[in-house]
Amino acid sequence: MTERRRLAVIGAGPAGLTAALAAAARGVLVTLVDSAPQAGGQFYRQTAPELGARRPQALHHQWRTWERLRDGLAAHIGAGRVTHLTGHHVWFVERQSGTSTADDTARGSFAVHALLGPEQEEPVTVHADAVLLATGGYEKVLPFPGWTLPGVVTAGGAQAMLKGGLVLPGRTAVVAGAGPLLLPVAVGLASAGAKVAALVESADPRNLARQARVLAAHPAKLAEGARYAAELARHRVRAQVRSTVVAAHGTGRLEAVTVASLDGDGRVRPGTGRRVPCDTLAVGHGMLPHTDLAEALGCRLDGVAVAVDDEQRTDVPGVWAAGEATGIGGAALASAEGRIAGLSIAARLDSRTPGRSSYASAAKARAGLREFFAAVDTVCAPPAHWTEQVTDDTVVCRCEEVPASAIREAVDELGAGDVRTVKLLTRAGMGWCQGRMCGPAVAGLARCPETPSRRPFARPVPLGVLAREPGEPS
Amino acid sequence: MTPRTPLDLVDARPGPAFTVTFDGREITVLPGQTIAAALWSAGVTSWRTTRGSGEPRGVFCGIGVCFDCLVSVNGRVNQRACLVRAEAGDVIRTQEGTGHHD
């Protein structure tokens, strides 16, 4: 009999899970490679089972969707169609040459290299005929004075710590920045017992009017927003729009933030600063896709995201991508893309073209949600002139402690015209995070477009793992 | 209305708690929590000082991407506190700079 086709899905959030289920249902052997201890990704991050949550849905919206994914995954694992590898941090996906032929343009042969264990030093390799990159995204935070104080966390980070470990960052929180993630974070913190002293959103609600046609085409999304607004009101959370946090204050840890109003051009209105005492600031300015694995494979990017075709194929044969790696848009969009990818992979590995009718409804959902989130991106863009609030002594590169003054000097006096040159001159982006945290800020201060950094490996890798010959027993 | 906690919100019944130490001080931990969650529960917000200016750092991204929360656990440095599960008896210490005295 024909050897069963093998798919490696990297990432177990909505996109990866949906794709795994769709492919497994059509006979593909799926290995789901997951960096987390449990499936769900960031959106459906689960509480550690040892904590015994009996009502976990209180921390989630769209819980029924998660239950269907979870139960479907369990069924396929039980039937031997899916293997779920948890705690596996993928650092490289290797295309193995000499195995593809002209007849196998849809597939390849791949080795997915991961690190396992609490210190992520134990090497593991997964072999597959096709790879789906469902690597998700991470939060963008633009710097402001005091943003490195303990107590300042990303909005998604506050949510992750709450969902996963049932802990709050502090007693009194301000939630601030730009983008739709701020709403569920503020609601989650308030529901769990934090006092949310303010929700500070830089967007101007009058901009909603300019996107009214697109937004009105998604009544379910508008209803979701209205539910969040009602919950915020119930928790007496004060929402301040057209506002931004201009500084965080404290000695050794956060004690207060200064919130100021923005004018129509996104500049801070002089004299509008107001101090808000708090021990937590949950801040975010949108999301960025994780693209390192795709780039290392040679996949083309479209702006900051992985470029894909109508079937979610990248331009590297045998490699698909879905979810936030291909553009930020939430769980429903990720699931639609995951379904399309899973169906495409199953067909192509069988040397067939997937019938368009099999994924027509998912393609329609994808098109609509992409349009919706493009409109949201326009409305919720960070303040246009945020760099004016970055004082010269503000640390911009958190890892290497590079202040804004060094970046400005590199650009204005030393002539750096791109992020890489700024990095070479100042060390910004050379630290552990490899520029994930400071990349957008350096680009903004350098007045360059935001482009992903080239990173050969997606994770820190011990030299011993690299030095080991392929196939050498560990 | 009674103030709630995350544990109340999800009606949690954790398994048995255990003890770790942070800079010599005993901290009670619920099972399944990361080191960052355990330290936050104990009111600790920072556990690393930066290499250059010696400023305090703790959790920032919460998902293992920023590496701000590096900490020393049982003598092993550069552990990401937001990812590493706490285990009974762990000896957690504030990490100074890179942890390698350079």
Image: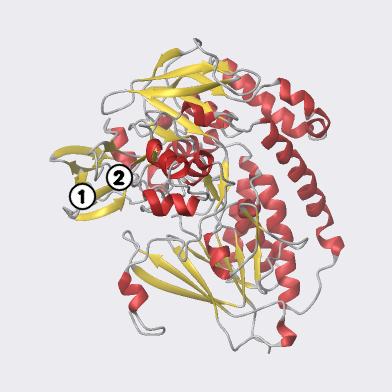
The image shows residue A437, relative to residue A354, as above or below, that is: above
Q: Position of residue B66 (x, y in %)?
A: 40, 47
Q: Residue at 71%, 40% (x, y): give it.
A: A373
* Whether label 2 touches label 1, CB < 8 Å: yes
Reading the image, the residue beneath label 2 is: B35
In the rendered image, which quarter is residue A379 located in? Answer: top right
The image shows residue A415, relative to residue A191, as above or below, that is: below
Q: Amino acid at mark 2?
A: Ile
Reading the image, the residue beneath label 1 is: B90
Q: How many marks?
A: 2
Quadrant of the snapshot with the C terminus of chain A: bottom left
Q: Residue at 64%, 31% (x, y): give it.
A: A380
Left or right of B52: which side holds A66? right
Q: CA distance from mark 2 to mark 1?
A: 9 Å
Instruction: Using the image, name the chain to which the residue with label 1 belongs.
Output: B
In the rendered image, which quarter is residue B39 located in? Answer: top left
Left or right of A355: which side holds A263? left
Residue A433 appears in the picture as rendered = no
